[in-house]
Image: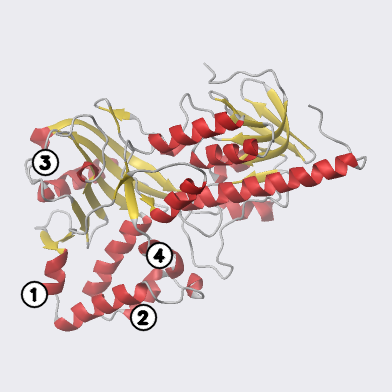
């Protein structure tokens, strides 16, 4: 069933996708008085921000954290975000799959014998410098190259790269710009109470209250034409018209909707973006065998373990633990589904021996989409922007748009796209009053 049914066919703006970006943009354009329609192909809203239930609890698919700067953006929209930040008691895990693994508490790196005095000083100086260094110019250098130039010790480089993976959700040091990586490393994060579904709910309520219409189970087949009138054809044959169309889906699916397609030289900028994936094991557990171990990351392997319920609330039953175990996958490589799952289970055996006896329910995601684009080194420091100049009236938003990363990129690009649409609408209205053609309503 459609969340909202409407007989209206002409709109000021149509937004494709009801994830965080689409719902935020819808609230903005609707508040500005624009007739706004949101089209979502799925039954439920939220896109990748939805939190499907596991053992009756809304659980994010894979480990999800939101940066405090992204929370600030939501608060500016009137959305309150509650949750907790992970504690700094991280365990570093060294070693390779099939070998004996070593657990290394953070304080042992600084105070124990694992690192030499010189290596400890390298790490301390890097952590201080990483928050102070001028990032301008580092967009053309990979984080791998930057660390090779600034950290002589290979062991300390591996420690820092594990922190970069944690901050960026990406195992691609040769493909990621140093500016993007260090920017993310500076961010503090929060695990959201109730999962990201709580953010979707708040943004949906705000968009509807502002007057936006949301229509789910409405898969788009084609985006035709350009300003002053674009034509949206759904897969069921329904047709809508709009002065502006904002797509918040991924770049490759979006390109396939365009009729006619963008010129090859223009389309390649979107088609060549490299997506990022992770293999994820989500668990509901009645307790942890070692409850004091709540956070661990791999040094020699791209592993992650965290007990999100240690700092945030997901269930009415406090004894139930929400556990996420992940492997960051190198961009461009297909996952080894069976091997990745066994690898994550073996990693968890090291962190929480006997864990399988306490599992209430589990979910394995062999190839979870983390982001539609790696922030690669480039002279202009930007992925594609929200305004499609080659097709007037067309806009995009998402984690692959603009200079930011992950959810912050989605929120910032959604705001920028909505602002551009509102400004263009005001300009169009001014021209209409002076005798130009208006879109029928």
Marker disc for residue 396: none
Image height check: is 250 above or below 87? above
Q: Mark 1 packing: few (<14 Cα in 10 Å), some, or many (20+)?
A: few
Picture coordinates of residue 306, whole percent (x, y): 22, 48
Image quadrant occupied by the C terminus: top right
User: Which residue is under mark 3?
Assistant: 288
Image height check: is 34 above or below 76? above
Determine the CA span between mark 4 and mark 1.
Answer: 29 Å
Determine the CA span between mark 4 and mark 2.
Answer: 15 Å
Q: Would residue 374 appear left or right of 9 to someone viewing this image?
A: left
Viewer-nearest residue: 75 or 92: 75
Pointer 1 and pointer 2: residues touching (CB < 8 Å)?
A: no
User: Which residue is under mark 4?
Assistant: 181
The first of marks 3 and 2 along the sequence is 2
Q: Would residue 405 appear left or right of 293 to someone viewing this image?
A: right
User: Which residue is under mark 2?
Assistant: 149
The residue at 11%/58% (across/down) is 101
Question: Is residue 101 visible in the rendered structure shown here?
Answer: yes
Q: Give the total number of marks visible in the rendering.
A: 4
Q: Nearer the viewer, mark 4 or mark 2?
A: 4
Viewer-nearest residue: 202 or 332: 202
């Amino acid at each position: 069933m459609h969340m909202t049914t409407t007989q209206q066919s002409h709109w000021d703006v149509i937004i494709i996708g009801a994830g965080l970006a689409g719902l935020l943009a819808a609230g903005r354009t609707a508040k500005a008085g624009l007739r706004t329609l949101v089209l979502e192909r799925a039954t439920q809203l939220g896109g990748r921000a939805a939190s499907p239930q596991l053992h009756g609890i809304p659980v994010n698919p894979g480990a999800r954290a939101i940066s405090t700067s992204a929370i600030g953006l939501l608060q500016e929209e009137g959305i309150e975000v509650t949750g907790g930040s992970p504690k700094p008691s991280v365990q570093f895990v060294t070693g390779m799959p099939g070998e004996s693994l070593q657990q290394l508490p953070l304080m042992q790196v600084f105070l124990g014998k694992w690192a030499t005095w010189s290596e400890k000083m390298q790490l301390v100086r890097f952590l201080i410098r990483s928050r102070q260094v001028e990032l301008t110019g580092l967009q053309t250098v990979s984080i791998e190259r930057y660390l090779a130039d600034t950290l002589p010790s290979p062991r300390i480089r591996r420690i820092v790269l594990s922190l970069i993976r944690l901050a960026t959700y990406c195992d691609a040091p040769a493909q990621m710009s140093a500016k993007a990586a260090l920017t993310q490393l500076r961010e503090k994060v929060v695990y959201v109470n109730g999962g990201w579904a709580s953010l979707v709910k708040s943004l949906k309520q705000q968009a509807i209250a502002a007057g936006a219409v949301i229509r789910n189970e409405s898969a788009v087949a084609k985006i035709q034409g350009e300003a002053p009138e674009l034509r949206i054809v759904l897969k069921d044959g329904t047709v809508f018209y709009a002065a502006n169309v904002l797509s918040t889906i991924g770049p490759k699916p979006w390109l396939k909707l365009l009729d006619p397609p963008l010129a090859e030289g223009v389309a390649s900028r979107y088609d060549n973006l490299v997506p990022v994936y992770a293999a994820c094991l989500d668990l509901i557990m009645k307790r942890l065998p070692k409850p004091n171990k709540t956070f661990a990351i791999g040094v020699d392997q791209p592993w992650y373990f965290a007990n999100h319920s240690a700092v945030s609330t997901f269930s009415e039953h406090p004894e139930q633990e929400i556990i996420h175990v992940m492997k960051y996958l190198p961009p461009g490589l297909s996952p080894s589904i069976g091997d990745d799952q066994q690898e994550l289970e073996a990693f968890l055996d090291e962190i929480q021996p006997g864990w399988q006896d306490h599992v209430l329910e589990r979910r394995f995601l062999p190839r979870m989409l983390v982001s539609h684009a790696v922030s690669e080194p480039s002279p202009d420091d930007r992925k594609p922007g929200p305004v499609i100049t080659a097709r007037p009236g067309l806009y995009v938003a998402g984690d692959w748009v603009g200079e930011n990363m992950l959810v912050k990129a989605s929120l910032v690009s959604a705001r920028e796209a909505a602002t551009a649409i509102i400004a263009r609408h005001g300009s169009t209205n001014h021209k209409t009053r002076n005798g130009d053609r208006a879109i029928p309503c």
